[in-house]
Amino acid sequence: MDLFLLFDYIGTLVFAISGTLSAAQKRFDLFGAVFIGFVTAIGGGTVRDIMLGDTPVAWIRSMDYFYIIIAGILITVLFQRSVIKLRRTMFLFDTIGIGVFMMIGLEKALNMGISEPIAVIMGLSSAVVGGVIRDTLNNEVPLIFHKEIYATACILGALVYLVLKHFEVPLYINQTVTSVIIIIIRLFAIKYNISLPKITLNESK
């Protein structure tokens, strides 16, 4: 199997688990959990493909994505009690998901001849839009808007990818390194409470 496709499947699976787990924590019914799992897994890729003009979007063209998402939902539902007890599980799944999807979206855009700055935006869309939809439907402020290092980790990973690509590092190494760096940056930032400064307004009386 092509490594690019394998990464895509992994990202789809972990985002489906992340979405379903978040729905379970909100005590949604089964339909709600399935719906949140689906939109979390396909949201970013759908928006990316539409903006790139690559339609029908990937998950419509292949049933593999459907089966992978169902598998992620079933894993979460069947082992829900055990998974929820692991407080950091959803965070870990979400972090893996953004690392994988950032790399996939960036590379897909570059392969279509998109300029590097716009390709980074396409990668960012792949990585964060699914989570934004998930959090919005869960009536929460999306993680991308928190002080956490989230989108910033994706952008830094994208820059590493472009540098390695410039030096003609083998693709499979570049893909793996990019995803791992994004994951490490976010984990490191959370562990040591590193964040971007908040923008505050000084209201005059």
Image (spheres, grey):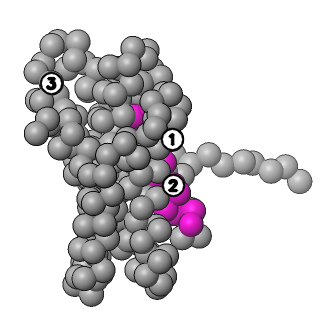
Is 140 magenta? The answer is no
Q: Position of residue 163 (x, y in %)?
A: 25, 18
Residue 47 numbered tag: 1
Q: Secondary structure at mark 1?
A: helix
Q: Main secondary structure of the magenta part?
A: helix
Which amino acid type is shown beneath numbered disc 1?
Val
- The magenta stretch spans which residues? 122-137
Quadrant where the N terminus is found in the figure: top left
User: Who's the residue at 25% across and 67% down the image?
Assistant: 71
Give the residue at mark 2: 132
Give the residue at mark 3: 171
Residue 77 visible in rendering: yes
User: Who's the residue at 43% across and 17% down the image?
Assistant: 114
User: Which is more N-terminal, label 1 or label 2?
Assistant: 1
Q: Secondary structure at mark 2?
A: helix
Q: Position of residue 104 (x, y in %)?
A: 30, 35
In which image quadrant can residue 67 be found?
bottom left
